[in-house]
Amino acid sequence: MVMAFEHLAGRVWLCAGDPDPELVQAGVAVIADERGSVLVDAGHSPSHAREIQAALLAAGLPAPRWLVYTHHHWDHVWGACAWPDVEIVGHVSGAELLRAEATRPWSVRYLREEVLRNRRLGPSFRARALAVDSWDELRVLPPTRVFTDEVELPTGVLVRHVGGRHAPDSTIVVVPDSGVMLLGDSWYPPPAHLRTPADEPDLALVGRLLDDDIGWYVSSHSPPLTLGEARAAITG
């Protein structure tokens, strides 16, 4: 699959992830600005990040100055070590979790040992093994700038903590001048190894976020929805 950025609205461009769910490859977004762009999520590995960088160059988009984590899960942050000279913005609770993740001895051997301890980790850890070309270059990076509730970046991009069951640090990114809200995985159920039969998508969370001034809603593993489509989705 060739990475490519497509224009959504205003300053917002999207690079879709791989639709194969077994690869667990999230999409990323760029809020383009000549003062320095904002990259939303890092890619799921250094090699994925390099493909995104090539796509940025091909699209003629300004290089990112900020990298925002929508949450700490590996498919959103493991590419961060391939993005030099960016300020990484993330929620304070995610920073704590990523500091712990950074101490793990990530390798194929370690993945195998963990799956033997907990078989439910199999799909996620298999995807990690497929994603990473070189374990020597992988470094898990906590954010360099943390926030608790909301922070506004110098380019007018709003970064807001919403939490939820998918991840305690789930964060959305709002681009008011473009009418776009980037939801990350905030409304998804918990990851598969933590999920129970009772867990469902958190449509109530989305309902609280809908805004007449925002025309587009973008999730990391789903196609973008217009405001009308998002309202129809949560009302059934």
Image (cartoon, rainbow, N blue to C red):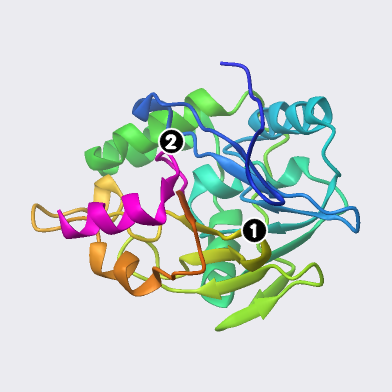
Say which amino acid is labelled 1: Ser
**Residue that sits furthest to the bottom in the current view:** 149
As drawn, is 183 to the left or to the right of 144?
Answer: left
**Secondary element type, mark 2:** helix
Q: Is residue 220 above or below residue 145?
A: above
Q: Residue at x 39, y 61 (%)?
A: 186
As drawn, is 162 to the left or to the right of 204?
Answer: right
Say which amino acid is labelled 2: Leu
As drawn, is 199 to the left or to the right of 35?
Answer: left
Q: Residues within 10 Å of mark 2 (few under 14, many from 20)?
A: some
Q: Is residue 161 magenta?
A: no
Q: Residue 110's x, y, as percent? A: 47, 37
Q: For the N terminus, give its image quadrant.
A: top right
Q: Nearest the camera: 216 or 136?
A: 216
Q: Residue at x 43, y 36 (%)?
A: 111
Label 2: which residue? 111
Q: Residue 149's x, y, as percent? A: 55, 83
**Secondary element type, mark 1:** helix
The residue segment tinted magenta is 219-236
**Corner quadrant of residue 151:** bottom right
**2 vs 1, front mark:** 1
As drawn, is 122 to the left or to the right of 32?
Answer: left
Label 1: which residue? 178
Q: Residue 85's x, y, as percent? A: 88, 53
Which is nearer the N-term, disc 2 or disc 1?
Answer: 2
